[in-house]
Amino acid sequence: MAALVRSATAAQVKAAEALFEQLAAALKGPEGAELVSKTKGLVVFSIDGDSWTLDLRSSPGSVAKGAPGEKPDLTLTISDAEFVRLVMGKLSPQQAFLLRKLKLNGSMGLAMKLQPILDAAAPRAKLKPFCPIHDLAGASCAARSSRGGGEMAAPAADALLEQLRATCAAAGQEHILNDWHDLTPEQQRQLAAEVQGLDFAFIDRALKASLAAADAAAQHAPSPVDDVITLESVDAAQRAAWQRLGLRLIREGRVGVLLLAGGQGTRLGSSLPKVRAAVRRARRPPGRGRGARPALRWPRSRRARHARAAGGRQGCYDIGLPSGKSLFALQAERLLALQRLAAAEAGGGGGSDGVAIPWYIMTSPFTHADTLAHFEAHGFFGLSRAQVTFFQQGTLPCLTHEGRVIMQSPCQVASAPDGNGGLYRALQASGALAAMAAAGLVGVDVYCVDNALARLGDPVFVGACVERAAALGARVLAKAHPGEKVGVFARDAAGRLQVLEYSELPPGLAESTLPGCSSLAYGWSNICMHWFSLPWLQAAAAGLRAAGAYHLARKAIPAKGGGAVGGLKLEMFIFDPFASAERATLLEVERAEQFAPVKNAPGSAAGDSPNTARAAVLAQGARWVVAAGGALAPGCTGVEVPPLLSYAGEGLERLVAGRVVGRPGEAAALLGADGGALAG
């Protein structure tokens, strides 16, 4: 067995050597100078006890086996197998870091520049047959190649199984291997990779800490917040001053927008959005038909791509608006409109004049591919690709109430994103946090993808938070009723800000009222629209690095056999570190203008569905048209105002004043760039 392992290790080292040889050749080639100029640093890869030094400080760069004679700018520690996966594109750097397969020591900014170096090592490398994805028990590559690449030597397979059994048994998770002998060799490799990627000790600690934290929270009664800036308390002059400050900061490139788009959207009833409406509307371009004036519309090929590419997760969802636009499209266009507003504030006319708001989008392994494909299919919706940064949050296994890992299939562990609080760890791991600091941002406006009315980057909110020197801020709503499924803001026993999730709020507290009135005591809703100052965000990310307590979400988990079992998802919430903020600003906003969640399946009696979100968007547009001096055609109750025409209702007078929008008898209209409208 020792000889077999040595043989496998030698084979793998040859594979890694081939990759470094390819990189060395690339550095000597025509692209070498450009690669070095983009990197500029001394980098060391520590791989299974061996070191490889990349001197990329000046051209020509070099690659040498062994440690350098001076302190490197960056050291990356990774196993040989995972390094091969990294270079071959089978593992992203973010995933490697989050899964603890990659350790970084040194400059995070330099680490962010290494992707071209990894790419240069991969394309033309001529490797001997090897197993880049979790080579099973170090099985001999030559032995596997002689068997057609599918099976490994029996002694190695037996040794691997014993190793996996010992690992699972020590954690009380023997059931994971129940179907091992029924699996194909490829499925066995997949399951082995799953087991090897699980940190059972961490999972056990996290579950115990989470249960203890839940019990402790139940023993300490919170108190209501009493410092919300209400709508009635802010006059027009103050609001205008905040807006001017927010627009100035945006124009100066000091504000970013951060989108949380890692959720699976399981309550929508399908992993894929409904595309039927988009396909139907693609037959007739917006602005055509029955004498309507030309409206804003996509070219035919782009509309067809939109209909085809509407698959994916929540952000790709078409809620049924006349335009057929997805949530991502609506949000991207709002960003473009905000850039135009910021430029206009400085006398920049109608264009954005170089204003490019950085847009950071957190996905998960479940949404990443769909999200990128959707953006690519639509040319990033008119945004510069350089201003959009995607990064992935981590995942954790789903557990039974007894702490047993749930199997989604005989060879796959059921897992889920680690909650929107995974944001903090993901920002650090991806290098996005370091990029924010390098860009000179003062903070970021944060929101969730499933809000059809999300006013991302709201300059009034940004200005209020910055003027008040808030470490963090939140846009809040008065709770609609005691049973509304939203978290609420409160204070803990020490007076620190916290959010009580609706699933953790006892009915007695949810229904309690303030003394002497009927207002709910815990009545200020958290709608996940936040401002994070960069210093606070950096401190929060560092402070949570060692935190082990998660929230327990009791869910029906899809399990092998096609059914579902009651289980637990371990989630960290984005508001978990809010207690560390010394100064916080809570600003009330209008529900009808800024909050239309898309959480439940179409037509759901529980509300918060595509139907209710669509109605909210159309009702908002109708209000804007009337406020701008327009009128609605008889029977027309809703108008879709494309974000490219107006960010928050401004500038519509020139289009609709004194005009009738829509057609008689048709309920929904799409406003065009010249004021024309097409009923949906």
Image: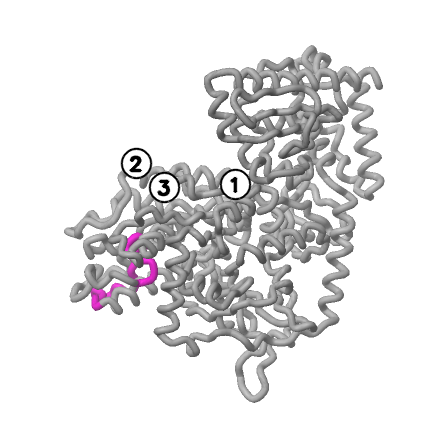
Mark 2 lies on residue = 301
Q: Quadrant of the C terminus?
A: bottom left
Residue at image coords 80%, 16%: 4
Q: Is residue 318 visible?
A: no
Instruction: State the SS at label 1.
Output: helix
141 up-or-down from 56: above or below: above
- Label 1 vs 2, first from the N-terminus: 2
Q: Amino acid at mark 2?
A: Ser
Residue 522 x/y as whole percent = 58, 75
Mark with earlier residue (2, 3): 2
Q: Amino acid at mark 1?
A: His
Residue range corresponding to the magenta coloring: 629-649
Question: Closest to the observer: 429 or 267?
Answer: 429
| Image disc number at residue 368 | 1
How far, Cα to Cα, is label 2 from label 3?
Answer: 9 Å
Q: 237 or 565, which lies in front?
A: 237
**Which SS type dominates the magenta stretch?**
loop
